[in-house]
Image: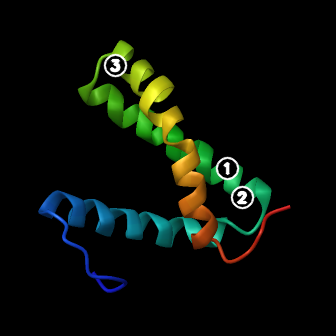
Amino acid sequence: MDEFDLDLNDTEVEMYEFNKKVWELIEPHSSTQHDVLMASAVLLKTAIQLYTVVLKDEDISAMLSHEACNSIPVLRKKLQGMLNRSLH
């Protein structure tokens, strides 16, 4: 990992690298609010589709309504430092 050296396990490193690749795909589609909403909708749909392969509907609903919702403030704070431009 080139940005910083952390004590991460193999899964965390794999997730970091995958996330980095996803951001490389998303970044060109983040210049307008429309672009961000479109990219977000496609990624959310894709995530839910992938979850349906390995989780029951109830488990997906629980994860989205609890774990995902509870992580919003933390994710928002992290993202504010990642975006170079503000969206209007």
Q: Position of residue 44 (x, y in %)?
A: 52, 40
Q: Quadrant of residue 84?
A: bottom right
Please identify the residue farthest to the right as the structure is shown.
88
The residue pinned by badge 3 equals: 59
Badge 3: residue crowd in 10 Å (few <14, some 14–19, many ≥20): few
Quarter of the picture holding the N terminus:
bottom left
Residue type highlighted by circle 2? Asp
Q: Position of residue 77 (x, y in %)?
A: 59, 58
37 in relation to 3, above or below: above
Q: Residue at x 53, y 33 (%)?
A: 69
- Earlier-in-chain disc, 2 versus 3: 2
Alpha carbon separation for disc pair 1 and 2: 5 Å
Q: Quadrant of residue 78?
A: bottom right
Q: Dots 1 and 2: beta carbons under 8 Å?
A: yes
Residue type highlighted by circle 1? Met
The residue pinned by badge 2 equals: 35
Q: Position of residue 21 (x, y in %)?
A: 39, 69
Asked whether 16 or 27 is in front, the reply is 16
Badge 1: residue crowd in 10 Å (few <14, some 14–19, many ≥20): some
Q: Position of residue 58 (x, y in %)?
A: 37, 13
Asked whether 45 or 11 is in front, the reply is 11
Asked whether 37 or 70 is in front, the reply is 70
Q: Dot 2: what SS?
A: helix
Please identify the residue farthest to the bottom as the structure is shown.
2
> How is the protein colored in the picture?
rainbow
The residue pinned by badge 1 equals: 38
Q: Dot 3: what SS?
A: helix
Residue type highlighted by circle 3? Asp
Left or right of residue 45, residue 37 in this image: right
Alpha carbon separation for disc pair 2 and 3: 30 Å
